[in-house]
Image: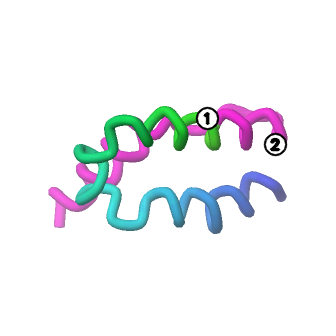
Amino acid sequence: MMVVFYTSIIESILTSSITVWYAAATKDKGRLQRIIRSAEKVIGCNLPSLQGLYTSRTRRRAEK
């Protein structure tokens, strides 16, 4: 249940326009990654890293 919430709400917010802002967010990447790690602790399972999210979204856009 918590994974569904994370995926639908938090990951959606994190990845909105990630292909545009990711390269420019140098010091914010660490902060965003800490949010993901905190969510992992609350949920109790592994979640994709910020780099992993960026890579998957970029590949998905390239396939279109």
Query: Horizontally, is 62 left or right of 60 in the view?
Result: left
- How would you rate the neighbour count of disc 1 (Cα within 10 Å): few for under 14, some for 14-19, many for 20 or more? some
Query: Horizontally, is 9 left or right of 25 in the view?
Result: right
Image quarter in which the C terminus is found: bottom left
Q: Nearer the viewer, residue 52 or 18?
A: 18
Give the quadrant of residue 19: bottom left
Q: Residue at x 23, y 44 (%)?
A: 23
Q: Is residue 5 above or below residue 39?
A: below
Give the quadrant of residue 41: top right
Q: Nearer the viewer, residue 28 or 45?
A: 28
Look at the magenta stretch and give its main secondary structure: helix
Q: Which residue is mark 2?
A: 43
Q: Is residue 44 above or below residue 14?
A: above
Q: Residue furthest front?
A: 27
- How would you rate the neighbour count of disc 2 (Cα within 10 Å): few for under 14, some for 14-19, many for 20 or more? some
Residue 1: give x, y in percent of width and height. 83, 58
Residue 40 forms part of the magenta stretch? yes
Asked which secondary structure carries label 2, the reply is: helix
Q: Which residue is mark 1?
A: 34
Q: Which kind of residue does numbered mark 2 sit on?
A: Ile
Residue 33: give x, y in percent of width and height. 54, 36
Q: Residue at x 29, y 55 (%)?
A: 21
On residue 50, the disc is none
Q: CA distance from mark 2 to mark 1?
A: 14 Å
Magenta stretch, residue numbers: 37-64
The scheme the figure's colours follow is: rainbow
Q: Which kind of residue does numbered mark 1 sit on?
A: Arg
